[in-house]
Amino acid sequence: MRQGKYFTQQIQQLATEIGFALQWQGPIILLAIYRSSHVLDDAEASLAAQLTPLEQDLASIHVRSDSFNIAEIIAETDRENKVFSIADLDQGGGENHADAYRSLNLHREYFIEENIRCVFWVTEREAQQLSLIAPDFWAFRHRVIDLVGHRATPNRSASFQGLVWTEWPWHVFKNDTKTALTYRKQLLEKLPDKPETALMRINLYAEIAGLHVQEENWAQALEAVKRGLDSMPAVTLPELEARLLVCLAIILLQMEHYSQAHAALQKAVLLAPDHDDVLTLLAQVNRLEGRRSEALAYIKKAIRLQPERAASWNECGNIYADLGRIAQALDAYQKAFDIFPEHVVPLINKSAVLASTNRLNEAQEVLALVPANKMVNLRRIAKRRGFEFLAEIK
């Protein structure tokens, strides 16, 4: 079995990515480029050994013309404690030997929705075919590891969840949160519970929720928004209810309750179909749930409706980064910053994408544009995947 330093490092990278996916209980789609069958045999054996401490078995799938539907094969297999090792995509049969690629493109969402952890061993030709014939599946990949030579993907993966730019759709006072909360709670206590005070009550609940959001007190923010929704008058006010549902979705997204956030936004879009907050948040939740094509469609619509909205451009950058379209991601983050230079999130995201492609000097130059009094807590952000470089250069 191969024991070279480069080969060992690359196998360890595969095992590390799988370990992260297990830790976060998420899917992982890895591509490993190899040159010969001997390399493949050694790589599978080495990875299987690396997975033993993680209590995972490597389940091998070799594509053939009568078994080209990889998603179907996995669905019929006991997936408990399994990482799937998939090879020989060119043996899938069909026109131009492309049935396996077409099947992957068709069933791409299965791998995300079912939390599949898998490694696709591909030759350079198969990698090229995968990107051409199955572009949507190709976009779902999380990491590419090169076993061929010293051209491997940089240690800093481009697979990261970009920081979101959240705009609370209600006025909140940013100074002295505690005093602001106390004042509004006192107003609520004194406010008669009558139909004519419903709008004032809703506004107070929304402002209270926003103040809790500033402090990242998600449970209390959620309770306040729900009370606001409960206070809605019998005569529906679509725009007002949509704004409250947007608030609800913002909180649920931060709590990682994506399906509930999606449901709230679907209701909001019926009430206010062209609301830019709704569209941007729909893009965000689709991105986080792995539906990148839908996410891109929503964000493009949001930008068409309001092209000078910086938060939408920031989310556009997040989506392009997830798709591996680095140049477009960098352009989108820059556009967000150009529109609203007082906000630092797009610059931090841009620096992370640059670092993920090993352009650390450029990443540092981008961060240098952020005024010291505008800089956020980088130490906290550096704990997030894809932002580890912050601990090194700041």
Image: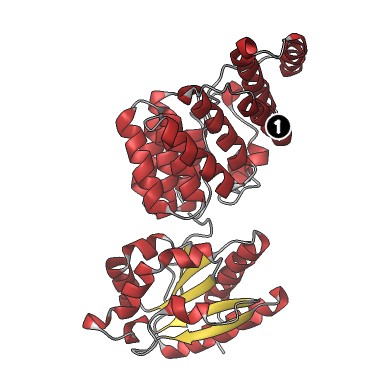
Decide if residue 314 is in sight here: no
Residue at the spot x=73%, y=17% of the render? 181
User: Which amino acid, by three-letter code, is at mark 1?
Assistant: Glu
Crowding around mark 1 (Cα neighbors within 10 Å: few <14, some 14 to 19, many 20+) is some
As drawn, the residue found furthest toward the left would be 95
Q: Name the residue under label 1.
A: 223
The quarter of the picture where the C terminus appears is top right
| Element under disc 1 | helix
- Residue 134 to residue 148: above or below: above
Decide if residue 37 is in sight here: yes
The image quadrant that residue 35 belongs to is: bottom left
Observer-nearest of 56 and 218: 218
Residue 184 horizontal/vertical position (percent): 72, 13
Residue 250 horizontal/vertical position (percent): 57, 35
Observer-nearest of 311 and 243: 243
Residue at the spot x=71%, y=14% of the render? 193
Residue at the spot x=51%, y=79% of the render? 74
Q: What is the image's colouring?
A: secondary structure
Residue 28 is left or right of residue 71, and the answer is: right
The quarter of the picture where the N terminus appears is bottom right
Residue 355 is left or right of residue 123, and the answer is: right
- Residue 74 to residue 319: above or below: below
The image quadrant that residue 316 belongs to is: top left
- Residue 191 to residue 394: above or below: above
Residue 76 horizontal/vertical position (percent): 52, 82
